Image (spheres, rainbow, N blue to C red):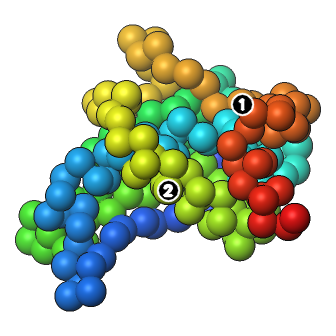
Amino acid sequence: MPNHHDCGSAMQFNISLHDINDENLFSKHSPLINFCANGLLDLTNSMLLILSPNSDDYLRYNLQININLFNKSKYTSPINLSLGNDNRTCAIRLTNSIANPNLKRLEYRVASANCEEFLALSAIIFALEYGLAKQQNNYSIIYGNAFDDCYKIEKIIDDLKTSQQFFAKEDNLIRKRFLEIIQ
């Protein structure tokens, strides 16, 4: 929904890992959630064309639009590669229920409502796999608004043409994984 007076429609992916006994692995092994979040953030711009296929989708990632929405007490969209605890201004929102640790999850808030959910989910799984294999923690938790000037965070691509160019790069891991599947 292209609209400068409210945040655009989005698709949120809620991710948790459970073992065979339905125990939440994010609660039992806390580094796992960070590894998954890092993989998603590292590869967000690489898979953004899949997550946001139309030019109007990129209005969601515009800094000024989000600042104006925030000032009007409206919901905002993520504009940078950030994560935060129960922070909806971030690309990834980490949730944690003290009452029920089995509900701990990460919310990946980047995709537009226009994305093809099966392609998006495939790309997200590739990014999670990448993060789990890499096992790094390169992103700090954001407190407050992720788009505040005090945070110098890499931006989410905010136009379709740049997203297309980024996806077309030969070293794009997400693109490579899709090509492996179709060959």
Which residue is located at x 35 percent, y 42 percent? Answer: 135
| Mark 1 closeness class: few <14, some 14–19, many ≥20 residues within 10 Å | many
Q: Is residue 47 left or right of residue 35?
A: right
The percent coordinates of residue 16 (x first, y second) are: 36, 68
Q: Earlier in the sequence, mark 1 or mark 2?
A: 2
Instruction: Report how far apart the C-alphas of labels 1 and 2 lie in the structure.
Output: 22 Å
Kind of residue indicated by mark 2: Glu
Residue 65 in sight: no
Which residue is located at x 60 percent, y 25 percent? Answer: 155
The percent coordinates of residue 158 (x first, y second) are: 74, 31
| Mark 2 closeness class: few <14, some 14–19, many ≥20 residues within 10 Å | some
> Mark 1, mark 2: which one is toward the viewer?
2
Q: Quadrant of the C terminus?
A: bottom right
Q: Extreme bottom residue here?
A: 21
Q: Is residue 163 left or right of residue 145?
A: right
Instruction: Give the numbered dot on residue 157.
Output: 1
Q: Is residue 152 left or right of residue 178?
A: left
